[in-house]
Image: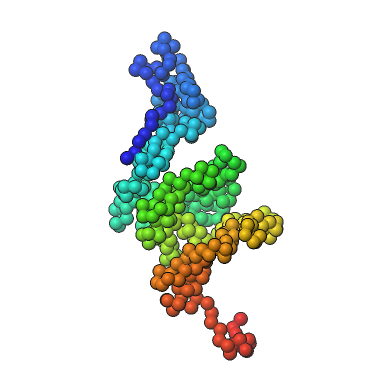
Amino acid sequence: MATTGHGSPTGVGQVSCDGSPTGISQADCDGETINARDKTGAQVNLDNAGEKPYMCGKFGYRTGDRSSLSRHMRTHSGEKPYMCGECGYRTADRSALLRHMRTHTGEKPYRCDQCDFCTAHKRALDQHLAKHTGEKPYMCEECGYRTTQKSDLSKHLRTHTGEKPYKCDQCDYSAAVKCTLDGHVAKHTGEKPYKCAHCDYSAARKISLDGHLAKHTGEKPFICEECGYRTAKKSYLSLHMRTHTGEKPYKCDQCDYSAARKSNLDYHLVKHTGEKPYTCEECGYRTAQKSDLSKHMRTHTGEKPYKCDQCDYSAARKSHLDDHLAKHTGDKPYMNVDIGQLQNPTSLDM
């Protein structure tokens, strides 16, 4: 059950029954331009009542809808009056709460008229329909990247410009994408409102929960049309596509190196700086990569999170599990060299 607070801040663009804004007398309303302003900085310009009379006094945002102004003003106040009674998720927007509730109810009202696909979000349906039409109207002029969504292109362009408009109000961190900032903010608050219905997993971001749920369902809805690669996460598909396009948007500012992934660029930069900020408190091991430290720590903890689904084998690293699985499948992903070739190196094809 969802609960809500008041729908709009007091006095934001409210108009009384006599036609004048709340707090302004009829005697003042002589046909001239009248600006009403409340304590949040919202204004009503009656001269433009037929256009976009509701304006934010802080940044000049304008709208023709009072409720839209109310939602906008919450971006300044931080108010989140709409709360999910199931998991405590809070939002400034009632429609966002309704969309969130579908993660609990399982409702998927948006259906494809060409196949049996259905989804909880209209944007996801729009993206799916592009698979039928093949249309990708939005293109990056820098590298030729194409997408079905204008918002995706806007996010992509930040890999070229370096723009990071989403800023943390508790430290100097900034991000190119809002969901990345949300994940960062959770490190300060510890809040993880997205909870798995199948186990005790919880996440700070919905996209993280979606990726986790695939472990239960086995669903991998994102498919590469080039080679058939499937994944549970859209971000993984985007990274994979660069193996086909050759796109390497992350560029080193000290040499001509470029990379398809930011993590690869970060790793490369260490060659210039020599910095190894991640240290093991057990043995003093140092590394440039947080992921490398995580793997190293398993040598101390004995943790083996990668488990074989065909026997009781488990491993500390995914690559070790992949090697083990080959024993079940019979795959031989690595070139076998027999003893005769090792004794006579000239027989090897180099």
The image shows residue 84 at horizontal and vertical percentages of 37, 40
Q: Establish if 37 lies above or below 182.
A: above
- Give the residue drawn at x 37%, y 62%: 218
For residue 87, say whether it is visible: yes
- Give the residue drawn at x 44%, y 79%: 330
- Give the residue drawn at x 35%, y 36%: 3
Q: Is residue 216 left or right of residue 163?
A: left
Check the picture and name the quadrant holding the N terminus.
top left
The image shows residue 271 at horizontal and vertical percentages of 68, 60
- Give the residue drawn at x 40%, y 49%: 195
* Count of number-bearing discs: 0
Q: Is residue 189 left or right of residue 29?
A: right
| Of residues 317 and 269, the one drawn nearer to the viewer in this rendering | 317
Q: Is residue 340 left or right of residue 35?
A: right
Check the picture and name the quadrant holding the C terminus.
bottom right
- Indicate the colouring scheme: rainbow
Q: Is residue 327 left or right of residue 141?
A: left
For residue 295, say whether it is visible: no
The image shows residue 254 at horizontal and vertical percentages of 69, 56
Quarter residue 250 falls in: bottom right
Q: Establish if 194 lies above or below 294.
A: above
Residue at the far top: name it.
27
